[in-house]
Amino acid sequence: MAFSRWFRTNRRKEVFELKNLIFRFSGLIVAFLVVVAQISPLCLLGHYQPEVPASLRK
Amino acid sequence: MSYLSFSRKLSSSLASAHHLDEEQQAVLAYAIEVITLNSVNTLLTLTLGWILDVFWPTAICLGAMTVLKYHGGGGHSESPWRCTLVTMLVFPLLALAAARASNWPLFYRDLISLIAVTAGSVSIIKYAPVDNDKAPIVSPERRMKLKKRSLITIILLATVMAVLRFITLDETGVINLCLSFSIFWFSFNLTPSGHRLWRFLDGLGQTEERRCSS
């Protein structure tokens, strides 16, 4: 009961804070994704190859 | 660029937050897809391996295949979900086969390892690196470099197998056979027969009309 009351009153605030947190670290996420894209132009262990963007083709 | 909807949505929200252009958005979508599909493949494969009581042999097969495929490429499926299904079935089956065959006499196990390394080396020299339309290898120098690296990888694996051959632990037989069976699967994927198998799997359950329209 206490948790549901807390959730109802704080949900918007929590969601806003979560979005804010994701936005704050999105630069790091983008940098991480660019590094991953650079190191694996050929597929790793599966047998499906997503289309490699033109700028990564070597 | 054709990416799955979740990668497109996520990359577009990241790109709009950082004012990235279309090409940079495609790079993000590609990275998201690589991370997600490889994680799902690994998780499902290891889970099935754990259910079949061959978790570590499955992990060894996956590791060997990853280092080999990273430089050598191989046959591909057009569908990520068919690829996931085959991957999650093949590696635990290779691990199960290795666990069963580890009881065989040493002579037969050595023979399997020898044939695997020979088949792997021949198929690398003849076919590697195998690219495709979605990930073409543009530069001939890079092609040569990947072939050399594939050969170095198989020499390293053969060295590991030779060292393990003389270590008398229960597990070494299973590890050697896992490496051998992974090399067999990798070599098969380099050959035209491997490509035919993937084309056959892609065509399963599709009517002629759907195949033409896709």
Image: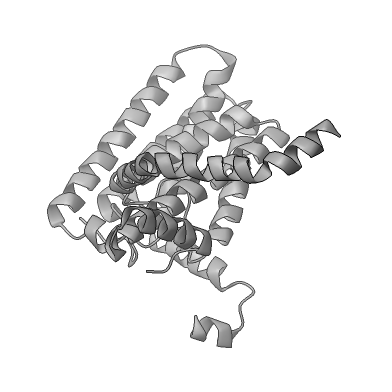
Find residue B46 and report its image quarter: top right
- Side of B151 relative to B80 (left or right): left
Find residue A26 and report its image quarter: top left
- Side of B17 relative to B144 (left or right): right
Percent x, y of residue B107: 51, 26
Q: How many marks?
A: 0
Percent x, y of residue B183: 43, 41
Query: Which residue sits furthest top?
Result: B168
- For the point 44% across and 18% down, the residue is B164
- Quarter placement of the N terminus of chain B: bottom left
Query: Which residue sits furthest bottom?
Result: B209
Q: How is the image coloured?
A: one colour
| Above or below: residue B46 compared with residue A30 | above
Query: Which residue sits furthest right?
Result: A1
| Above or below: residue B52 compared with residue B88 | above
Evaluate whether residue B112 shows in this view. Answer: no
Evaluate whether residue B134 shows in this view. Answer: yes
Find residue A32 and report its image quarter: top left
- For the point 58% across and 25% down, the residue is B105
A16 or B199: nearer the viewer: A16
Query: Which residue sits furthest left?
Result: B141
Percent x, y of residue B137: 23, 58
- For the point 56% across and 46% down, the residue is B40
